[in-house]
Amino acid sequence: MLVEVNTSAKDPETPARTGWGRTRIGVAVLAVVLLAVALVAAVTMDDPVQDLQGPGLRSTLTLVCGVLGLSLLAAALLWPSTAKPRSLALFSGAVSVLCVAATVFIWVCVSVDDQLHSIPGSAVSTPAQARQALEKQGLASGRAAIPTGVMIETMQYTSSNNVKLTGYLWQRLPKGTETAEIDLPNAVEGGIGDEIYRDPAPGGREVVGWKLNTTVREYFDYSHYPLDRQVVWLTLWPKHSAENTLVPDFAAYPPWKTHDGYGVYHDLVSGDWSRQFSTFSVGHGTAHTNYGRPGLSVGNQIPQLTYSIGLNRAFLSPLLNRLVPLVVIAMLVFASLFVVTKDSDRRSLSGFSTWAVIGFCGSMMLVVSVQHSSLRSDTGSGGIVYAEYFYFILYLVIGLVALNAVEHTSDKRIRLVDWRGNSAARLLYWPVTCLLLFAVTTFVFVL
């Protein structure tokens, strides 16, 4: 007897498979669109470093769309599901690596930035620019210009806000002038030392040089520590501000180039810092007093010459000093997730108990808090510095691991937490941690 087979009947799984296939294609298309947006934003940027230091809109678009697009592309290729735990693990690792790579990219961009930031007044590199800047601010009329030069030989941080400078100062003064026409308003110790030389100069003037040995105090912004950049100011005021104004003695240097380090000894040793630029700038300071002198007004503007040295912290050493111990702690906390189980037989072998995990998390929290306190002491910052977010993230992660242990011994059951013997927590641990690090880094340096 022949049995007729209906070949037109469809496999009941075909619609489901077709639906999954369409979804996978949709995810891949979305990934390509996001990557195209990231590529366009990256290509239209003149300089990613400047964009990071500016509005940061295109940099944000490039980074966020790039990470999200590559993550979706990995999802389309691996197509992770609960039926394929290996694909879930690979996807978890891919997302973590992408977030870390994007974070490191931001670190590199920030570290190579050599633009002028936090320069008081107007930066000048020629006598004509100095004259124009003084005229624009109304500081040239009725005042004699005194060329002044600086050569810094050593520089040392003595505290979080004090810097000790040694070197030389010189001025082209009218012949017979006995003292320097210089006041150091931000000096807290030392000052202009003994006269070193006095040479005749054209126009009835003399070039007089003095030893410089002073400690200057200024506010340093450590909010980006250990990727911070600082600018050391040597602020110079004329002693007779109503009669004189100070201008850079560019004749004593080669044609001025901001990034060639003029005015700084080329073998200057500054600890964990590297020199980015050096420049003169002219502006004015307002003391809001006439110092009791009837010839001056209370709102008198004091001509100000500033020699600025831009410094970039050699961030690798302090970053590793802070980050490596935290990575080790994060790995130990991650390992504790493999001890957490509801299986009574495995509990007896691993020694798992709620109090054991909570005690372990508490000890890790104590270690992290001690290092956090050390960081606060080292920077002396009144606000939150970037490196502190490492500790905040670890506080959160350790707390979640402790809650995870509590859930496994409680009467209430959460299906996601209990899935495949705590596999969900293990798969989410590194992506969540790395994603938080990337989000914080983007917020601090880009947004």
Image (spheres, rainbow, N blue to C red):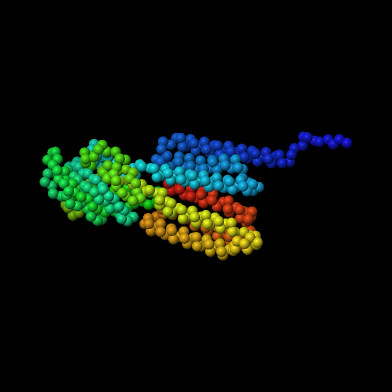
Q: Is residue 330 visible?
A: yes
Q: Position of residue 225 (x, y in %)?
A: 40, 51
Q: Nearer the viewer, residue 238 or 343?
A: 343
Q: How many tags in the picture?
A: 0
Q: Position of residue 221 (x, y in %)?
A: 36, 51
Q: Is residue 239 left or right of residue 352?
A: left
Considering every residue shown, the one lying at the far right of the view is 1
Q: Nearer the viewer, residue 87 or 287?
A: 87
Identify the residue at horizontal 47%, vertical 55% (top origin): 326
Within the image, what quadrant is residue 248 found in? top left
Q: Is residue 130 left or right of residue 91?
A: left
Q: Is residue 75 left or right of residue 114?
A: right
Q: Position of residue 20 (x, y in %)?
A: 65, 41
Within the image, what quadrant is residue 373 found in? bottom left
Q: Quadrant of the C terminus?
A: top left
Q: Is residue 131 visible?
A: no
Considering every residue shown, the one lying at the far bottom of the view is 355
Q: Is residue 320 left or right of residue 337?
A: left
Identify the residue at horizontal 14%, vertical 38% (top origin): 202
Within the image, what quadrant is residue 377 found in? bottom left
Identify the residue at horizontal 63%, vertical 48% (top origin): 85
Q: Position of residue 430 (x, y in %)?
A: 54, 51
Q: Quadrant of the N terminus?
A: top right
Identify the residue at horizontal 19%, vertical 45% (top origin): 170
